[in-house]
């Protein structure tokens, strides 16, 4: 797979990276279709770049981006996960405190998102964006 720049600070490689897919030999994870690439580009430009700016223009660590259906099933994702359509990313700053601070910053900002999810007491933060009809939904998953 060619490492395509999706936006100034995010690449396709970064958005499809998966240790689970590599370990389980799920090769389709690394060959997304053009519709998925287009969604990932939109996600990066319209949400992830804005979140990076909100973070003082410091890098944000993506622990999960796109997941092909087979990978999504392997990691226990729900079948309706926006990760499968290239519309979501999980962010992890390495500590629950840092994740909580980031979550609160996003929540207080004017940045448009579909979902902002605190997953498992700030183990990571899920963000998603659709092309239209974004719900600005804030969720806590225990």
Image (spheres, rainbow, N blue to C red):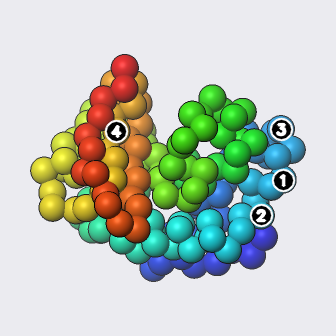
> What number is the disc on residue 31?
2
Q: Distance between the residues labelled 4 and 1?
A: 28 Å
Q: Are marks 2 and 1 in contact (CB under 8 Å)?
A: yes
Q: What element carries label 4?
A: strand
Q: Name the residue under label 1.
A: 27
Q: Are marks 4 and 2 in contact (CB under 8 Å)?
A: no
Q: Residue at x 60, y 61 (%)?
A: 14
Q: How far apart are marks 3 and 1 (CA)?
A: 9 Å
Quarter of the image that includes the C terminus:
top left
Q: Distance between the residues labelled 4 and 2?
A: 27 Å
Q: Position of residue 62 (x, y in %)?
A: 49, 52
Indicate which disc, 4 or 2, sits on the residue closer to the N terminus: 2
Q: Position of residue 83 (x, y in %)?
A: 55, 49
Q: What element carries label 1?
A: helix
Q: How far apart are marks 2 and 1 (CA)?
A: 7 Å
Q: How crowded is mark 3: few (under 14 residues within 10 Å), some or many (20 or more)?
A: few
Q: Name the residue under label 4.
A: 117
Q: Are marks 4 and 3 in contact (CB under 8 Å)?
A: no
Report the side of 23 relative to 73 (left or right): right
Q: How crowded is mark 1: few (under 14 residues within 10 Å), some or many (20 or more)?
A: few
Q: Is mark 3 on a helix, strand or loop?
A: helix
- Residue 38 higher or lower than 20, as above or below: below
Report the side of 18 relative to 87 (left or right): right
Indicate which disc, 2 or 3, sits on the residue closer to the N terminus: 3
Query: Relative to the observer, which residue lies in front, 118 or 129?
Result: 129
Residue 5 seen in the current view? yes
Q: Residues within 10 Å of mark 4 (few under 14, many from 20)?
A: many
Q: Name the residue under label 3.
A: 24
């Amino acid at each position: 797979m060619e490492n395509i720049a999706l936006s100034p600070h995010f690449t396709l490689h970064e958005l499809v990276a998966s240790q689970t897919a590599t370990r389980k030999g799920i090769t389709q994870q690394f060959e997304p279709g053009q519709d998925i690439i287009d969604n990932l580009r939109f996600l990066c430009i319209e949400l992830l770049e804005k979140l990076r700016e909100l973070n003082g223009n410091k890098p944000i660590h993506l622990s999960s981006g796109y997941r092909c259906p087979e990978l999504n099933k392997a990691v226990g994702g729900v079948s309706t996960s926006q990760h499968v359509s290239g519309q979501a990313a999980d962010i992890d700053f390495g500590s629950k405190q840092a994740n909580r601070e980031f979550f609160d910053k996003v929540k207080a900002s004017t940045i448009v998102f579909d979902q902002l999810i605190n997953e498992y007491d700030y183990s990571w933060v899920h963000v998603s964006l659709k092309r239209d009809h974004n719900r600005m939904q804030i969720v806590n998953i225990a």
